[in-house]
Image (cartoon, rainbow, N blue to C red):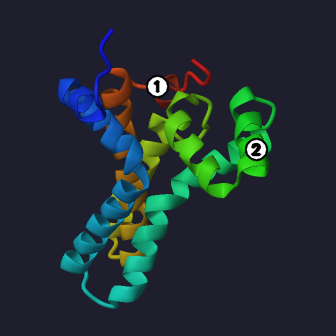
Amino acid sequence: MPEVSGIAYYEQMTKRKKLTIMSEHYHGQMHFLFGLLAWVFGMIIFGGDQASLLIVALLGAYIPDADHLLFIFWYGRQTRYAIEVRECLLGDGLLTCIDYIKKNHKGNTKILSHNMLFVALAMFLSSWFVYTSQRLWGVFFLSWSLHYIFDILEDLLFFGKLNGNWRLRFGK
């Protein structure tokens, strides 16, 4: 069978596969951009101190993924995925471990906070805090909501359906 170069292989991929690869590679950067989007929204609606609003928006963009760490080191520590991540971290170092997580975290359907109840709660809190003019909390939960929405869209891209955890079907 003739060998296919990387460029030729890439050209043969479907648009969906290309998007999946890009999304996997730039997952963290996308959350950063959604944090910036929440910050811009907050600046347009409320104005005020840019730095504190930016910090809150970026925290809201990344804090939902703290549950991945809780899973790896606490409530899911006995799962194969968590054991592999910890072994990778101890044996191969942080950068290799991050790469491993980027490529494998989508198959983990046991993350407790990534479900529709948390999405609804984050969206409700964002709306409530914006309505009551509590700009920092409003932007924080808007950013948190955008994080979940991106993860949902990414699951649809990767799998063509939602992971079970979004429907409270953990591990399925």
Assess disc 1: are there few (<14), some (14-19) or many (≥20) residues with their C-alpha within 10 Å of its C-alpha: many
* Amino acid type of the residue that numbered disc 2 sits on in the rendered structure: Arg
- 71 vs 90, left or right, is left
Q: Residue at x 32, y 60 (%)?
A: 34
Q: Is residue 76 visible?
A: no
Q: Secondary structure at mark 2?
A: helix
Q: Which mark is residue 163?
A: 1
Gap in angstroms between the C-alphas marked 2 and 1? 23 Å
| Residue 45 against residue 126 in the figure, above or below | below
Q: Residue at x 34, y 53 (%)?
A: 146
> What residue is rendered at 23% in x and 25% in y?
13
Q: Nearer the viewer, residue 9 or 159?
A: 9
Q: Camera-side residue: 82 or 46?
A: 82
Q: Secondary structure at mark 1?
A: loop
Whether pointer 2 and pointer 1 mark residues with C-beta atoms closer than 8 Å, the reply is no
Residue 86's label in the rendered image is: 2
Q: Is residue 98 above or below residue 44?
A: above
Res 168 quadrant in image:
top right
- Give whichever of 126, 84 is nearer the camera: 84
The residue lying furthest to the top in this view is 1
Q: Residue at x 24, y 73 (%)?
A: 40
* Residue 39: x %, y % from top left: 30, 73
Quadrant in which the C terminus is drawn: top right
- Residue 166: x, y in percent? 47, 30
Q: Which mark lies nearer to you, 2 or 1?
A: 2
